[in-house]
């Protein structure tokens, strides 16, 4: 973000920050394997207001999933969307921080993106732009998490492997979700506008793990 930083330098620093955030999640998981009291399973119900509530819910669910949480979209009579997220406390915290940051970045990027001349529906174009942004950042976060897990696996000495620790945590979270919601179904989000590629390009430049970021508690429980 500093003046004089070139785009390649900014991308390299952003990638490093994402790597640090992902590695923090692995370290917390491994610590909890030997000291369970340091990181407990938890859940939160989050109400997401309009505008673009469905897209924002897609962003939140994708980030949470990449960080080894699991989500259920709930029906609601109120405008907007409602999501129930299950995960270990450290992963919920990481998702909170990143979601808060990306909401701001996404809003700034959309405001700065001019709708091309000749577009029949500006709203459809903007929605497709948002979905492109969301897809790009989720893809990048997933990659960072996978690299961190692979790196930790090679460094592990003594105790259960990183893969086993993460697998055990996934089972615990899945059991929590299934106890709360025995029957679920998958949902898909679609778009019709032509702004997807522009939004995706912006998402590839988004900051996905600035170490200086402080949580604004976007995931307040309902």
Image (cartoon, rainbow, N blue to C red):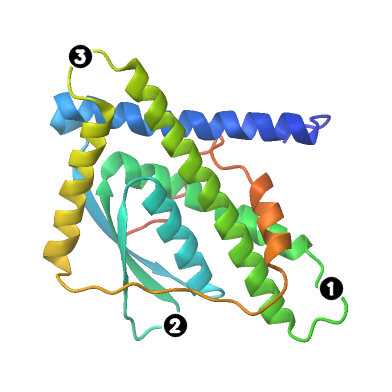
Q: Where in the figure is residue 191, as x and y percent of width and height?
A: 59, 76
**Residue for badge 2:** 79
In what element is the residue under mark 2?
loop
Q: Nearer the viewer, residue 57 or 214?
A: 57
Name of the residue lying farthest toward the top: 157
Residue at 21% across, 33% down = 164
The numbered disc on residue 27 is none
CA distance for labels 2 and 3: 51 Å
Task: Give the mark nearest the N terminus, 2 or 1.
Answer: 2
CA distance for labels 2 and 1: 29 Å
Q: Quadrant of residue 127?
A: bottom right
CA distance for labels 3 and 1: 57 Å
* Comparing labels 2 and 1, the label whose residue is closer to the camera: 1
In what element is the residue under mark 3?
loop
Mark 1 surroundings within 10 Å by alpha-carbon count, few (fewer than 14), some (14 through 19), many (20 or more): few
Name of the residue lying farthest toward the left: 179
In the picture, measured across the screen, residue 188 lies left or right of residue 36, that is right
**Residue for badge 1:** 116
Q: Where 151 sits versus 191, above or below? A: above
Q: Quadrant of residue 118?
A: bottom right
Task: Give the mark nearest the N terminus, 2 or 3.
Answer: 2
Task: Give the mark nearest the N terminus, 3 or 1.
Answer: 1
The reply to whether dot 2 and dot 3 touch (C-beta < 8 Å) is no
The reply to whether dot 2 and dot 1 touch (C-beta < 8 Å) is no
Q: Where in the figure is residue 52, as x and y percent of width and height?
A: 55, 73
* Comparing labels 2 and 3, the label whose residue is closer to the camera: 3
**Residue for badge 3:** 158
In what element is the residue under mark 1?
loop
């Amino acid at each position: 973000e500093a003046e004089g930083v070139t785009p390649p330098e900014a991308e390299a620093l952003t990638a490093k920050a994402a790597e640090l955030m992902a590695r923090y999640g692995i370290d917390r998981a491994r610590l909890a394997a030997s000291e369970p009291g340091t990181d407990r399973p938890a859940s939160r119900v989050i109400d997401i207001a309009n505008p673009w509530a469905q897209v924002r819910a897609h962003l939140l669910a994708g980030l949470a999933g990449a960080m080894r949480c699991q989500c259920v979209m709930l029906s609601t009579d109120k405008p907007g969307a409602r999501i129930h997220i299950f995960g270990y406390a450290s992963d919920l915290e990481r998702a909170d921080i990143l979601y808060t940051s990306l909401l701001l970045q996404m809003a700034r990027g959309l405001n700065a993106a001019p709708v091309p001349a000749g577009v029949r529906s500006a709203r459809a174009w903007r929605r497709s732009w948002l979905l492109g942004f969301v897809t790009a950042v989720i893809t990048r976060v997933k990659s960072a998490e996978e690299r961190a897990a692979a790196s930790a696996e090679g460094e592990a000495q003594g105790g259960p492997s990183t893969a086993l620790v993460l697998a055990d945590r996934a089972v615990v979270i899945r059991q929590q979700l299934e106890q709360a919601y025995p029957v679920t179904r998958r949902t898909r989000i679609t778009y019709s506008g032509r702004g997807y590629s522009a939004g995706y390009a912006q998402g590839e430049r988004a900051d996905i793990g600035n170490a200086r970021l402080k949580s604004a508690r976007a995931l307040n429980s309902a």
